[in-house]
Image: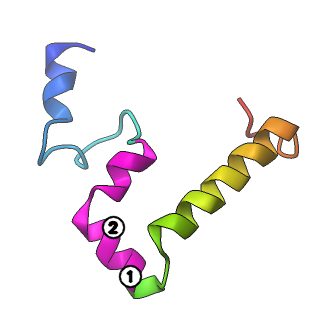
Amino acid sequence: MTAERDHRFTVGNRWRGAGVELDLAEVLAEPMVHLLMRRDGVSPCALRRVVAAARAALRRGLCPDLAA
């Protein structure tokens, strides 16, 4: 990554443009995400289970177009 691109993803700038997607731990570290999840009745544990199930389905080849 270039220095210019690194600057785009510093705290406060991470949502301002396209680029590298955050991993699940980073998403779950965001307070706003917790507020939305609480509003929607979704726990971090439940979300992790859904993500794990989707990853397992991709590994089994149930969604070959998305496995790339």
- Work out which residue is located at the far front of the displayed protein and give it: 45
Write the start and end of the magenta stretch as one range.
23-38
- Locate the C terminus by quadrant: top right
Other residues around mark 1 within 10 Å, as few (<14) / some (14–19) / many (≥20): few
Under mark 2, the amino acid is Val
Q: Picture coordinates of residue 11 (x, y %)?
A: 13, 43
Give the main secondary structure, helix, strand or loop, of the magenta stretch.
Answer: helix
- Locate the N terminus by quadrant: top left
Q: Is residue 12 left or right of residue 59?
A: left
Q: Is residue 64 visible?
A: no
**For the image shown, how many numbered marks are present on the structure?**
2
Q: Nearer the viewer, residue 38 or 10?
A: 38
Q: Residue at x 25, y 49 (%)?
A: 15
Q: Picture coordinates of residue 29 (x, y %)?
A: 28, 55
Secondary structure under tag 2 reads helix
Would you name the residue on which mark 1 appears?
38
Would you name the residue on which mark 2 appears?
33
Residue 35 located within the stretch drawn in magenta: yes
